[in-house]
């Protein structure tokens, strides 16, 4: 929670508490009608602060993540083939799902996770 929200909640608590005290004091023998107005304004301001601090920031609906990989040296790409049907896969068939590379075969629609095998 950010410091701004914490300060807003504490301020709202003070405004609501003292607002109710002003409203309560209005009905005492020495009470004045002005105290009722101050109390109502304080309580309303406290609840407005709570509403403002409690709302969540707007999040963009579509977020695209681009991962650029810098490979050292000369790297040649071998052709990849589907494990199920043997169809040739292209880089467009690879996507990241939960941080793991996943391949979807355009021919047989099989989906599986890419695993890197040791080179020795």
Image (cartoon, grey):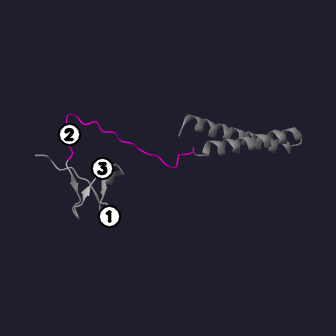
Marks 2 and 3 sit apart, C-alpha to C-alpha, by: 15 Å
Whether residue 61 sits left or right of residue 52 in the image: it is left
Let me know if residue 31 appears in the view.
Answer: no
Q: Residue 109 has which mark? A: 1
Residue 65 drawn in magenta: yes
The x, y position of residue 66, in whole percent, is 39, 42
The residue wearing badge 2 is 75
The x, y position of residue 56, in whole percent, is 58, 46
Q: Hey, which quadrant is residue 32 in on the image?
A: top right
Nearest the viewer among 13 and 85 is 85
The mark that comes first in sequence, 1 or 2, is 2
Q: Hey, which quadrant is residue 74 in on the image?
A: top left
**Circle 1 Cα neighbour tier, 10 Å, few/some/many (<14 / 14–19 / ≥20):** few
User: Could you say whether the residue bearing mark 2 is in a helix, strand or loop?
Assistant: loop
The residue wearing badge 3 is 91
**Residue range of the region highlighted in magenta in the rendering:** 57-77
User: Could you say whether the residue bearing mark 3 is in a helix, strand or loop?
Assistant: helix
């Amino acid at each position: 929670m950010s410091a701004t929200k914490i300060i807003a909640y504490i301020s709202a608590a003070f405004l609501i508490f003292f607002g109710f005290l002003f409203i309560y004091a209005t009905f005492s023998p020495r009470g004045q009608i002005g105290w009722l107005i101050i109390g109502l304004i304080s309580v309303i301001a406290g609840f407005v602060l709570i509403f403002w601090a409690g709302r969540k920031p707007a999040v963009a609906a579509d977020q695209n993540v681009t991962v650029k990989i810098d490979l050292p040296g000369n790297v040649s790409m071998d052709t990849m083939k589907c494990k199920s049907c043997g169809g040739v896969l292209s880089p467009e068939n690879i996507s990241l799902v939960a941080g793991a590379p996943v391949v979807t075969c355009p021919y047989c629609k099989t989906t599986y996770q890419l695993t890197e095998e040791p080179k020795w």
